[in-house]
Image: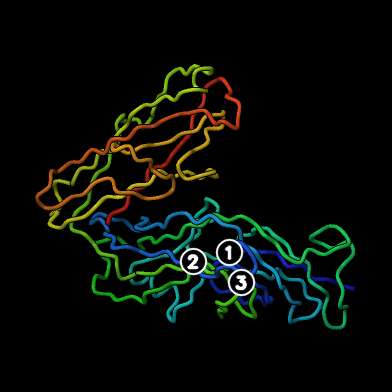
Amino acid sequence: MRYLLIVVTFIMSFSVLPVWAMDCYAEHEGGNTVVIGYVPRIAIPSNGKKGDKIWQSNEYTMNVFCNNALPAPSPGEEYPSAWANIMMQLAEGQEFYNQNSYTFGVTYNGNDYDSTTTNVISAPQCIDVKGAGVYSNSYKNPAVCSGGPEPQLSVNFPVRVQLYIKLAKNANKVNKKLVLPDEYIALEFKGMKSAGSLDVDKNLTFRIRGLNNIHVLDCFVNVALEPADGVVDFGKINSRTIKNTSVSETFSVVMTKDPGAACTEQFNILGSFFTTDILSDYSHLDMGNGLLLKIFHSDGTATEFNRFSQFASFSSSSAPSVTAPFRAELSANPAETVVEGPFGKDVILKITYN
């Protein structure tokens, strides 16, 4: 007697493996099945290089619920069978975009996956499925996924997803007159008869929309940090007084138009303080020692980690350099005990043009 199990996985590009029917939603059964990352009017700097990220969506955090897994079309064959694909869904596929300037991808749980790759990403999650055909119509006991007599018939697991676009060639080689299809399906949680067809009703998909909002500039900026080493040093902190107050240090991001570029157009610089850490909320970063980090703009508004906000605006008549000041603040996490000793945290500054 043989049995099948279903493993929730990610697969990049098309697959010829048979996969089984399964429903996947955002958060709960019957939930949303379409998440759209809208590309605003963005600009590519004139010095953009092949492989540069030119756009990245805000981070989507949610639970994915999958159920209703059906037996395999080939009775008794054991394959992984719930798929989330970086899809080549448009007629010409990713190769069409790659030839005409762009590569799409997703950042899944902090790791990047280009749509040109063929790697399989495992969630990993598991749903028990009955045997089929000549083998049986019952579940294994103990069940493979639950480990007990009762099978696991659904899963609900957390994911963090960002969508992105990269240059597939240098900016000066981009086809500026190309009109692209407006929407690209970048990621799909699916259990299908084949990985090349799409059932949007019960398959959670992440899509990039607004591909024709991309524009190549005749300008670019050089970005520097103050302090130059990029280290914000809080010095010594009293572990007792920090429980009732906060400490702050300042730093700046300096953006300067390249003197050799034409720079005849108006554009904005957007920035994001990026972390691969799991965030309890987007305003605070857990330092791992009972303290929380928060970063403020000069007007007092808090930045949000992994989300973009405006840092500067440039035009042909504007000053060649703009400095964006920030304030980094440490405060005690009321739910944790402050641990004494050295500490640190790396945060990546990401810049995009709009």
Would you call the spot at circle 2 few (<14 residues within 10 Å), some (14-19), or many (20 or more)? some
Asked where in the image residue 183 lies, by quadrant, the reply is bottom left
Would you call the spot at circle 3 few (<14 residues within 10 Å), some (14-19), or many (20 or more)? many
State the residue position of label 1. Answer: 26
Picture layout, residue 205 above or below residue 122: below
Q: Looking at the image, is mark 2 or mark 1 earlier in the sequence? A: 1
State the residue position of label 2. Answer: 35
Would you call the spot at circle 1 few (<14 residues within 10 Å), some (14-19), or many (20 or more)? many
Q: Nearer the viewer, mark 3 or mark 2?
A: 2
Single out the residue that lies furthest toward the front: 244
Q: Is residue 196 visible?
A: no
Callout 3: helix, strand or loop? strand
How far apart in space, not on screen, are marks 2 and 1 (Cα)? 9 Å
The disc labelled 1 sits on which kind of residue? Ala
Residue for point 82% across, 79% down = 132
Query: Which coloring applies here?
Result: rainbow
Residue for point 60% across, 30% down = 336
Picture layout, residue 236 above or below residue 104: above
The label on residue 190 is 3
Q: Is residue 185 visible?
A: yes
Q: Relative to residue 11, is residue 71 drawn left or right?
A: right
Q: Between 136 and 325, which is closer to the camera in this rendering?
A: 325
- Disc 2 + disc 1, Cβ < 8 Å: yes
The disc labelled 3 sits on which kind of residue? Lys
Picture layout, residue 111 above or below residue 11: above
The label on residue 234 is none
Asked where in the image residue 283 lies, by quadrant, the reply is top left
Asked where in the image residue 28 lies, by quadrant, the reply is bottom right
Q: Between 336 and 227, which is closer to the camera in this rendering?
A: 336
- Number of labelled discs? 3
Residue 347 % position (x, y): 44, 39
Q: Relative to residue 234, is residue 29 drawn left or right?
A: right
